[in-house]
Image (cartoon, grey):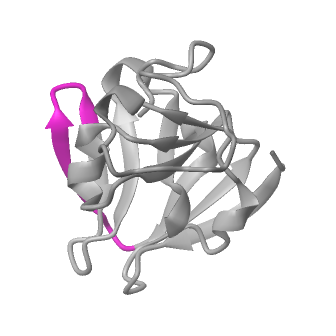
Amino acid sequence: MSTNVVEGGCCCGAIRYRISGTPTNSMVCHCQSCRRVAAAPVVAWVTFPTQHFQFLHGQPSEFHSSEPVRRTFCAACGTPLTYEHRDHASSVDVTTCSLDDPNAFPPTHHSWLTHDLAWVRFGDGLPTFGEWRPSSNPAQT
């Protein structure tokens, strides 16, 4: 995974963010919570230390999808932006496809396949995990 400065934002352009540094994780999540929030069968995430992430303009809306989890999104267009777990405040997960260049951080694995939809099939050959990858932060999606 590369060390760069990258930017991204929501679909309508109301919210922009910048990230610097090296990601600590990049994955595709199959959990029910991510699916419901994005109304999609899976969501790709890239994780960075919180201090390397900043909103440039616009103020995202937020909600708690569960007690320890805060998610942000654009109130104008609905784009999901971030996932933060209270117990792991030093990292932030960013929706990979909200990046200007989602190809910059390809996923390394699939997590939460115990929640997977029966009709989802991937042929990318990436490792899969029933819940989270054992070496990754369990608070991450």
Q: Residue at point 38% right, 41% down?
A: 30
Magenta range: 58-69
Residue at the farthest top position? 134
In x, y percent, where is residue 13? Answer: 42, 84
Residue in the foreground of this view, choosing between 132 and 115? 115
Horizontal placement of 92 versus 125: left or right? left
In x, y percent, where is residue 70? Answer: 27, 40
In x, y percent, where is residue 66? Answer: 17, 31
Relative to residue 129, is residue 56 depicted above or below?
A: below
Is 37 one of the magenta-colored residues? no
Quick one: quadrant of the N terminus?
top right
Residue at the farthest bottom position? 12
Q: Residue at point 42% right, 52% down?
A: 43
In x, y percent, where is residue 96? Answer: 55, 58
Relative to residue 130, is residue 4 depicted above or below?
A: below
Q: Residue at point 62% right, 74% down?
A: 100
Residue in the foreground of this view, choosing between 32 and 135? 32
Quick one: quadrant of the C terminus?
top left
Q: Residue at point 31% right, 60% down?
A: 40
> What is the total number of numbered labels drawn onto the structure image?
0
Is 66 one of the magenta-colored residues? yes
